[in-house]
Image (cartoon, rainbow, N blue to C red):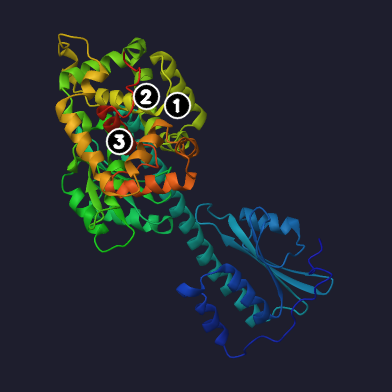
Amino acid sequence: MGDVAGRADEAPDTRRPQDTDGAWAAQLLDHLRPAGREPRRVVGWLGPAVGAVVCLRDARGGLLAGEPLALDETVLADLVTGRISAAALEDGGRHVRMVGIPHPQQGPAAGAVLAVSRPEPFDRRAAEIVNRTASVLELLLRERELTEAGRRLRRATADLRLAILQLLMVEDTVSARRVAAGLWPGLLEADAARVYVLEGSPADRDRLAEDCADVTGGEALVVRCPAMDGHVIVVTPRPAAGERLRSLVDGRPGVFLGGSLRQRLARTATAYAQAISALAVARFRPDQTAVFAERTRPARLMEPAALRAWSAGVLRPLDRLPHHIRAELLATTRLGLEFTAVNAAKVLGVSRNTVRARMDRVETLLGTDFSDLSTRAAAHLALNTEAAREPHDSDEPPPPAPARLGDLLTSAALRTWADDLLGRLDADGRDLRGTLCAWLAADSNAERTARDLGVHAQTVREHVRAAEPVLERQLLAMGSDLYEVVLAHLSTGALAVPALGR
């Protein structure tokens, strides 16, 4: 028989049991209260209750609670496999009781073993306490297993929601619908949807995501953003969802909502960028909400046929690629221009090196350089114009003359919009307009701008930050807001028109 004694350097607790009148049952039941459901606490109580050293092991021999004990491996094997349910041993003057704790999904096999060792034999009372404690531990371990299974299910569901969003981001609507159909039938049957982005504190995001799922009643794809810790992304075809989501923002300090226009599912990436842009505006609004359509966009002020012809000409080198590769490159580049490569990679579920490689390939095909801010703004315009094309637009005849970006940027309507937008900065005595123009010309590099203007880099950043609420646009983060301000400067002639599409 193997050694069943306690550790040599630790004598077992031989204090007298805590009671002799059955009060132990009430104490044991207390461990089933919501505040006390912890196997370690039960094992810690059992030792003094029967004057013993207690060990709780899992089926693989790992210590779950209590003190490690050297136990008879043969008996343990019989308990774990379910050949016996309990055993009482005596070895070297020590008395050991072992009880198998069943696993709900393993039939008679035990998921854990409770072992109790003490110097004196187990009387009826002590044996009953051990057996009852094993029953309580079975309940607690089963609850823990169910809780863990629920956590795994929630994690799997969240991963599935993210996978659906990532498929939509690269325009693979067929696969996205197939994945969604099993768990959320009908969710993506509509051809169009809106994207909303809610922003709160990272610590409260799980609660915010749950609230979003509750108010949309299962009629929305709710995703914890993989790139921004405080963001929750909601994709929904239901018109009423916007008002329901606004109700979550109302009266909650630090929570903001940005919404997109209604877009085709294949344009989810564009809708997401619109929602992010609206979110930047929401931060300056008293009601903490904004929708992308609430302000004039420069693309709407350009001649539509000429703009589509120009964008088609810019992107024509990609037309030779297979459709799925072209769509993947365009979707990745749109997000890569909208966010950092790291965040775009998180949204798409690929590595940042993959994002950079795809964007490098687009640069090569277009014969351009995305390190230039004006070029990025022009490419962003072309990509989003292409993404907005309806299927019937492909048969539209080209304009009589070749489209040029310079001509698009000098339209009277666009010039009026640009003058009005940038004119808001003239009221500030710090020359925000001059600093902003120099900063854009330096590809948004504060240090280069500071050298050009002969000021401190922090002054440049403060001026740009001060311009954000005046223009109602987020400038220090790359994206649609910044590119709109670049287009305004291109329209007024403050910046040179880039070579893209010439």
> Which of the two marks, 3 or 1, is nearer to us in this view?
3
Closer-to-camera residue (191/116): 191
Residue farthest to the bottom? 21
* Residue 40: image location, x then y, percent: 60, 69
Instruction: Determine whether, in the image, residue 155 is placed left or right of residue 215.
Output: right
Real-space CA distance between mark 2 and mark 1, rounded to the nearest whole angstrom: 8 Å
Closer-to-camera residue (177/253): 253
Closer-to-camera residue (83/48): 48
Task: Give the residue type at disc 2.
Answer: Thr
Residue visible at 71% across and 76% down in the picture: 52
Residue labelled with disc 2 = 375
Residue 376 seen in render: yes
For residue 332, above or below residue 435? above
Residue labelled with disc 1 = 371
Quadrant location of the C terminus?
top left
Q: Quadrant of residue 207?
A: bottom left
Residue visible at 80% across and 69% down in the picture: 5
Query: Marks 1 and 2: in contact by CB < 8 Å?
Result: yes
The label on residue 485 is 3
The label on residue 363 is none
Q: Quadrant of residue 210?
A: bottom left
Real-space CA distance between mark 3 and mark 1, rounded to the nearest whole angstrom: 17 Å
Task: Give the residue type at disc 3.
Answer: Val
Closer-to-camera residue (254/16): 254
Residue visible at 71% across and 80% down in the picture: 51
Q: Quadrant of residue 23?
A: bottom right
* Residue 500: image location, x then y, percent: 34, 18
For residue 458, above or below residue 117? above
Specify few, some or many for label 1: CA neighbours under 10 Å numbering under 14, 14-19, or 20 or more.
few
